[in-house]
Amino acid sequence: MSNRSIGLDEPLYRYLLDHSLREPDLLAELRAETAVLPEANMQIAPEQGQFMALLARLMGAKRYLEIGTFTGYSALAIALALPEDGEIVTLDQSAEWTATAQSYWERAGVDGRIRLELGEARDSLRALEATGEMDTFDLAFIDADKTGYHDYFEHCLRLVRPGGLILVDNTLWHGTVADPDDARDDTCAIRAFNDALHHDERIDLSLVPIGDGLTLARRR
Ligand code: CA
């Protein structure tokens, strides 16, 4: 027995999925379609989608902001967990990836509660702040270019209400954050981001070793 987080080898990870994953058929289909793309590793793990949906339900979340739509898996997972009057704003630059996303949102019947904004995320975030959407989101998820994390997080701290939750993906970055020989821009950006949040008094913090590392930051 140990008082540290458990590592998951392949048999144990398989066990976790076999004994807890409740992935709706449409999400499984979207995951399979995305798996053939060269960028497939940008999709979140299914157990992470389930965890995020559970968080949304726990919070009674109605408004969800997402930076990095990709093919729409996380937006769909959250959309299925929101109430009828829930609203999602999701930001991406790729018309191609988000076309896949939109087709699945339509099939799930949740496209009416998802607003996709294509373009530079910083511009979209500034526009949300300028049009009175500050303090209106219950939940946010940052999963885009890693060198932008600092800026995206500052925007989310203004757009999420006090008591709301900001989730940040890939904060263990395939384990490379702990490899002193890895000096790539993305790795350095995530390390600096993690260090800044560690001592940020504006939030309550937990870095959860699910998927590629998921940071939970609750706005105080
Ligand atoms: Ca990611």
Image: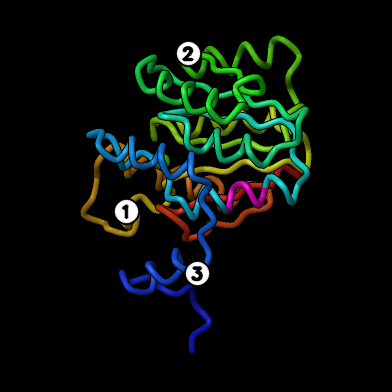
Position of the C terminus, as image quadrant, is top right
Decide which of 161, 117 is in the foreground and name it: 117
Which residue type does callout 1 highlight?
A: His
Give the left or right position of residue 2, taking residue 206 as reference. Answer: left
Which residue type does callout 2 highlight?
A: Leu
Residue drawn at x 42%, y 46% as measured from the top left:
170
Asked if the residue at tag 2 contacts the one at tag 3, i.e. Cβ–Cβ closer than 8 Å, the answer is no
Residue that label 3 marks = 19
Query: What distance separates the C-alpha of mark 1 from that of mark 3?
Result: 24 Å
Residue drawn at x 75%, y 36% as measured from the top left:
83
Asked if residue 97 is positioned above or below residue 140 in the image, the reply reads above
N-terminal label among 1 and 2: 2
N-terminal label among 3 and 2: 3
Give the left or right position of residue 207, taking residue 145 as reference. Answer: right
Residue span colored magenta: 51-55
**Whole-percent x, y for residue 69 in the image:** 47, 28
Residue that label 1 marks = 174
**Whole-percent x, y for residue 155 in the image:** 61, 26
Which residue type does callout 3 highlight?
A: His
Residue drawn at x 56%, y 14% as measured from the top left:
124
